[in-house]
Amino acid sequence: MPVHAGTTPGLARAALTIALRDATASFADDLSRGTIGRHHNTYQHRTRILRQMAAELSGSRADATGSGT
């Protein structure tokens, strides 16, 4: 999720946190129903997206606290 001009970093982090929570819940629901793997929604693809979102959120938190890598 790119941060758009005029968006505060706090709002961007909050939006990413909500998106990650929703995507994780959707993934868990789909996995429990056995619908993973249909129409390019493979387990590997979805877990990669969740890892990328979590890494972006972690990076934005590090930037906010000034403890960059």
Image: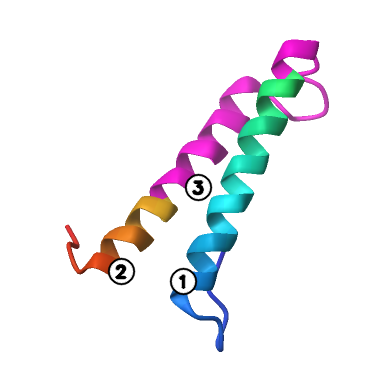
C-alpha separation, residue under disc 2 versus residue under disc 3: 17 Å
Residue 68 or residue 38, whichever sits in front = 68
Mark in the foreground, 1 or 3: 1
Q: Is residue 58 depicted above or below 6 in this figure?
A: above
Mark in the foreground, 2 or 3: 2
According to the image, label 1 marks what residue?
10
Chain-order first, disc 2 or disc 3: 3
Type of amino acid under label 1: Gly
According to the image, label 3 marks what residue?
53
According to the image, label 2 marks what residue?
64
Give the prevailing secondary structure in the magenta stretch: helix
Q: Are marks 2 and 1 in contact (CB under 8 Å)?
A: yes
Residue 36 is inside the magenta segment: yes
Q: Residue at x 56, y 88 (%)?
A: 6
Local packing at callout 2 (Cα closer than 10 Å; few below 14, some 14-19, many 20+) is few
C-alpha separation, residue under disc 2 versus residue under disc 1: 8 Å
Q: Position of residue 57 (x, y in %)?
A: 43, 54
Instruction: Identify the magenta region.
Output: 31-55
* Label 3 secondary element: helix
Q: Quadrant of the C terminus?
A: bottom left
Chain-order first, disc 1 or disc 3: 1
Residue 4 sits in which quadrant? bottom right
Q: Is residue 59 depicted above or below 27 in this figure?
A: below
Q: Residue at x 82, y 28 (%)?
A: 39
Residue 64 is inside the magenta segment: no
Chain-order first, disc 2 or disc 1: 1
